[in-house]
Amino acid sequence: MNISSFSYLFAGILLNACAQLLLKAGTNRLGEITLAPATLMPTLMQIGSNLPILGGLALYGLSVITWIAGLSRVDVSIAYPLLSLGYVVNAIAAYYLFGEVLSTQRMLAIGIILVGVYILARS
């Protein structure tokens, strides 16, 4: 895999991770969401007018476009496992942005993911 191909894939991964973080920020503003029939329409209206959620959805769209560009250059059996880098980015960002816990087990799992991605990228 060359640097250009990796750049497309990594950009898609980062856009996807940022989208997820924006969705979380939006849901933090809304509080717990229930999809009960009686509250479905007001809930959908709140979601549809929430700027972080709308931004997250837009970034998802951009991530799909860049991901497709990356897939046109790299085998899916190489590209798809790279998505796990999104877990690493999100875990670290959520620690700083939302105060989520990075326990020893999570840090170990992040290390395993990074080793796995390194081995995969070198294959």
Image (spheres, rainbow, N blue to C red):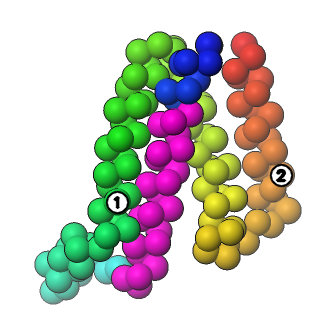
Q: Amino acid at mark 1?
A: Gly
Asked if residue 57 is positioned above or below residue 23 in the image, the reply reads above
> Depth check: 35 or 44 in front?
44
Whole-number angstrom distance, CA of label 2 to CA of label 1:
31 Å
Q: Residue at x 38, y 58 (%)?
A: 56
Q: Residue at x 80, y 34 (%)?
A: 115
Disc 1 is placed on an element classified as: helix
Q: Amino acid at mark 2?
A: Leu
Q: Main secondary structure of the magenta part?
A: helix
Q: Of callouts 2 and 1, which one flags the residue occurring earlier in the amino acid sequence?
A: 1
Please provide percent x and percent y for residue 57. Answer: 32, 55
When asked about the image quadrant of residue 85, the answer is top right
Q: Does residue 121 appear in the picture of this structure?
A: yes
Residue at which label 1 appears: 55
Q: Residue at x 29, y 73 (%)?
A: 50
Marks counted in the figure total: 2
Residue at which label 2 appears: 108
Quadrant assignment for the C terminus? top right
> Depth check: 34 or 73 in front?
73
Residue 91 left/right relative to 52: right
Say whether residue 20 is magenta: yes
When asked about the image quadrant of residue 116, the answer is top right
Disc 2 is placed on an element classified as: helix
Please provide percent x and percent y for residue 17. Answer: 52, 51
Asked if residue 12 is positioned above or below residue 72 in the image, the reply reads below
Q: Magenta region: which residues? A: 10-32
Mark drawn on residue 91: none
Q: Does residue 77 appear in the picture of this structure?
A: no
